[in-house]
Structures are given as C-alpha cells and as structure tokens.
Image: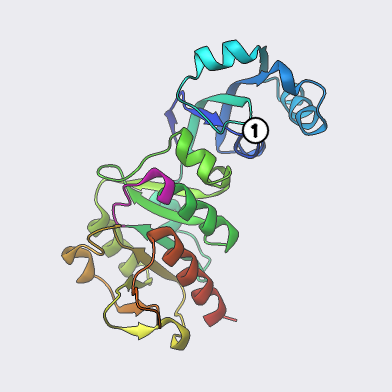
Amino acid sequence: MTEETMNQLIKGKHAVIEAINSSSVEVDRIMISFLLKGKSDISHILAIAKEKKIKIQFLSPKAITEQFPDEDNSQGIFAYTLKFSFYPIENLLNDPDKHQKVVVLDHIQDPHNFGAILRTCECFGFKNVIFPKDRNAQLSPTVSKTSAGAYSHLNLIRVTNLHQTLMKLKKSGYWIYGTCPENGQALNRITAHTPFAIIIGNEHKGLSPLLKKVTDDSIYIPMSGNIQSLNASVSTGVILYGLTQSQS
C-alpha cells in the first residue's frame, strides 16, 4: 500500500472507533470531552487506544470549542491521523479473485455525498473504490463522519487518470457499467458480469463523455414518480443493492 501523511482530523464516535480498528489508518492521538469520561462506549475506545499505544487527551468543553470551532456534530470526540494507506491499483489488477466488484467515482464533489457513498460501498461489500486525485472530494473530517468510519475498511484507490485506469480494468477482464438516467438496461432486469466496475457519475453532469465511451453497458433506475432523479449517494445505494441482487 502507498502511505500518505494526512494529519487528518476525524470527528465522531463511530468514525474514531473504525479508524483505530483499521489496518489502513495510523491514529496519532484522540481528544475527548471531559463530559464523556466514564461512559461505557468511551471506555471501549480507551481500552483499544491503550492497547495500540495511542495518546489520549481529555479536554474541557471550552477547550473543545476553542480547538474545533467549526466542527459541530462531533459528539465530543476527535482524533488525528498520521498516515492513511491508499490501495495501489496494481494490487487490484493482479488480484486472482475473478469476482471483484469495483465502484468508480467520476468526480463526486460534495463531501457528504462522497462519505455517504463510501458507507454504502462498505455495507454492500463493494470494498474497492476508485476516485480521482483532482476535482473530487477527498478524505476530510466531513467525509469520515458521514461515512461513519467506513472509509477505513475499504480499498481506496486514488488515481490521476480515470480513463486510463478504466482501460487497465478492461484489459484485466473487467466489465464496465455506467450509470445513465435515460437509457441502457433497467437495474431490475440486469444480470451482472463479474468481475465488474460500476461508474457513478458526477452530481450535476453525470458521466463524462470520455468515460461513457469506455462502458460496456449502461444502467438506469426505473422510476415512476414525477421527479425522475435521485441524489448521487441515494442512487448509488439503489444501484449497488440491485447489482448485489443480480448476482444472487
């Protein structure tokens, strides 16, 4: 794995727990509000931190507010990471498992969408997530909190060129699906090939024209309401669930 020094702030109980339990994340220290001292769920965090020799700081509510003035909904618990290990694309390409499922994000820019999509990927067993280095939301306190720490259990593959990466996947035998609201195969009628990658389009522009040319098939979600569109993270959840069912 390639390591990157992040010094990233993680906020929220679940995100911190998942981070300290992850093999991909190196946690430097944990800051906890004095008001939480003695709580059972905090005791669990303290036990793991002691075992892994992670520094703990208890802070007053005033100190919490002063140090993290813009971080609401934190539940009074924060952590700083030293390193996060991104998963090399070569590991995926050389994986002998021929039933891999990959999610490719085509420039998802809202960190709440990014975090929610990562949480959905982990829940439905899509452990490999590819996203671009530029013009895409990156790991941040908001992403880690929204993902409920799910990002720390995924193979996050950050690349500089999505098109080239998809071409490598095709050469390795991956079937490439793209999301398209207008045409293609209805999600409830599809039988997914394996291994496969599903491209999730940008919140506003959908799939980029260049990536559309790479796809082997397009998938759309049949809808009957007057508003024929879904939020990017919601549509991702529907699609990943549907693809999971298509393989059962």
Residue 109 belongs to the span the image colors magenta: yes
Q: Which residues are magenta?
A: 106-113
Residue beneath label 1, please? 20
How many neighbours does mark 1 have within 10 angstroms: few (below 14), some (14-19), or many (20 or more)? many
The secondary structure type at the circle numbered 1 is: helix
Please name the colour scheme applied to the rendered image: rainbow
Q: In screen coordinates, is 201 left or right of 192?
A: left
Residue 57 belongs to the span the image colors magenta: no
From what the image shows, is residue 67 above or below residue 36? above
Which three-letter amino acid code belongs to the residue tagged 1?
Ile
Q: Nearer the viewer, residue 3 or 8?
A: 8
Identity of the residue drawn at 82% across and 23% down? 38
Identity of the residue drawn at 58% across and 25% down? 79
Residue 84 x, y percent position in the rendering? 49, 34
Q: In screen coordinates, is 76 left or right of 166?
A: right
Residue 182 x, y percent position in the rendering? 26, 79
From what the image shows, is residue 231 above or below residue 37? below
Res. 227 image quadrant: bottom left
Residue 108 x, y percent position in the rendering? 33, 52
Determine the main secondary structure of the stretch shown in magenta.
Answer: loop
